[in-house]
Image (cartoon, grey):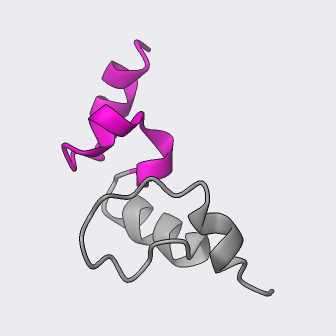
Amino acid sequence: MECKKEENLKDCNCSYPGCSRKGVCCDCLPYHLKMRQLPACCFPDDVEKTYDRSFEKFAEAWDL
């Protein structure tokens, strides 16, 4: 499968400096899921900037 990094970057709101997975969703998603987290794109920008990518923070951010 071909990575569409440049296209993905248009929607990637990851603000972590130096992130090697930015725009590479096929690396980002497994990385975060392995740590019981969700990637930045699952969070509103203001919540993403806290770097708390936990499932609990996701539920809180979206009032679930």
- Magenta stretch: residue 6 in it? no
Q: Position of residue 20 (x, y in %)?
A: 37, 83
Q: Position of residue 34 (x, y in %)?
A: 38, 66
Q: Which residues are magenta?
A: 38-64
The residue lying at 30 percent from left, 47 percent from top is 53
Residue reaching furthest top? 63
The residue lying at 31 percent from left, 58 percent from top is 15
Compared across the picture, whether 27 is left or right of 61 comes to: right
Q: Position of residue 38 (x, y in %)?
A: 42, 50
Q: How many marks?
A: 0
The residue lying at 70 percent from left, 69 percent from top is 7
On screen, 26 above or below 15? Answer: below
The quadrant of the picture occupied by the N terminus is bottom right
Compared across the picture, whether 36 is left or right of 30 comes to: left
On screen, 17 above or below 11? Answer: below
Write down the quadrant of residue 11 in the picture. Answer: bottom right
The residue lying at 19 percent from left, 43 percent from top is 50
Compared across the picture, whether 6 is left or right of 13 comes to: right
Residue reaching furthest bottom? 2
- Magenta stretch: residue 39 in it? yes
Write down the quadrant of residue 17 in the picture. Answer: bottom left
On screen, 27 above or below 39? Answer: below
The quadrant of the picture occupied by the C terminus is top left
Q: Position of residue 61 (x, y in %)?
A: 35, 23
